[in-house]
Image: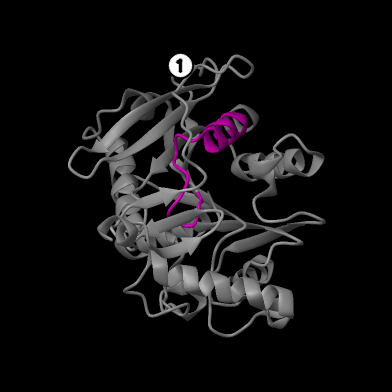
Amino acid sequence: MASSTAEEITHDFPPFIRVYRDGRVERLIGNDVVPPSINRDTGVQSKDVVIDPETGLSARLYIPKTPIPHHKLPLLVYFHGGGFCIETAFSPTYHNYINSLVAEANIVVVSVDYRRAPEHPLPTAYDDSWAAVKWVASHSTANGGEVWLKEYVDFGRVFFAGDSAGGNIAHNMAIRFGSDGLDGVKIVGMVLIHPYFGGKSPTGSEGDDGNNIGKAAADKFLLFVYPSSRGSDDPLINPVVDPKFSSVVCDKVLVCVAEKDFLKDKGWYYKEELGRSGWGGVVEIMEVAGEDHVFHLIKPTCENAVALLKRVACFLNEDKA
């Protein structure tokens, strides 16, 4: 009987994650990892670093092939997606994507491996991500010890980016940076790819039957990863209701959405509301026709994925001196 009880499923979100009554967590996808490397095709180098041994917070760092000595490069701090509970910075999906982006944009990347729900419910991912941002910022002075950051990074040209849940994290890091600030670092811009944002009131086509089902499932999932939240209008989830919304720290934002993604309308809503919030920066949007959520990670060599990669790389370099 005890064994039968232990095997009882308490939370089931196929095809992503399942939790059993005895507390065991079964991640159904996103478990594969690959080591850091020197990429054969691009020459991009990567290595892993531990940011906080106590919590296990870590990151994977990337530099382009043969950086020019004393020539500082833009830095992108990247937050992976996966619903706050699957995938890591070390998964082949993200390792391959970041490799391609570093090669295309000629930038340095810190890909953050925050702790995941449900073992570490939100807001842990936000706290870990902020700790990673502070660690990055420490290298703008003599305090940081990571050679790649001290040697190759222009701390006057730092960007935040992420996809899906990682896009949500990137936005919240820009808000926190705007409130708390970190000396020696300038956040120039932010890229939100198919960002996960919520809200009790339907936006655009969210009231349609198909999209309404997706919204209801996302709201249920939110309570799983963030049980202490105020629901989908929690300011961390619905940025528009956040009193600090207009304090996004950067000067420019690129929001990327996909036509068939049920989160598309929230991305458009974010873009429109940020533009009229009094923030004062420039916000752009790129919608890709015929594609669904994070298509660029699922089929990275397709024409639309390549176009998206090039658009992001252009955004990261368009004001380069």
Asked whether 101 or 153 is in front, the reply is 101
Q: Residue furthest bottom?
A: 201
Q: Is residue 293 left or right of residue 8?
A: right
Residue drawn at x 38%, y 42% as measured from the top left = 113
Report the magenta residues as a range. Answer: 81-101
Q: Quadrant of residue 57?
A: top left
Rendered view: 99 above or below 174 = above
Residue drawn at x 59%, y 70% as measured from the top left = 270
Q: Is residue 293 left or right of residue 302?
A: left
Query: Where does the image place residue 296, in percent across and percent down from the top left?
Result: 68, 44
Query: Where does the image place residue 175, in percent across and percent down from the top left?
Result: 41, 64
Query: Where does the image place residue 268, in percent across and percent down from the top left?
Result: 67, 69
Q: Is residue 99 magenta?
A: yes
Q: Is residue 163 left or right of residue 18?
A: right
Q: Is residue 24 left or right of residue 223?
A: left
Q: Residue furthest left?
A: 54
Q: Is the residue marked by circle 1 packed among few (<14), some (14-19), or many (20+) residues within 10 Å?
A: few
Q: State the residue position of label 1.
A: 69
Query: Where does the image place residue 259, in percent across and percent down from the top left?
Result: 76, 61
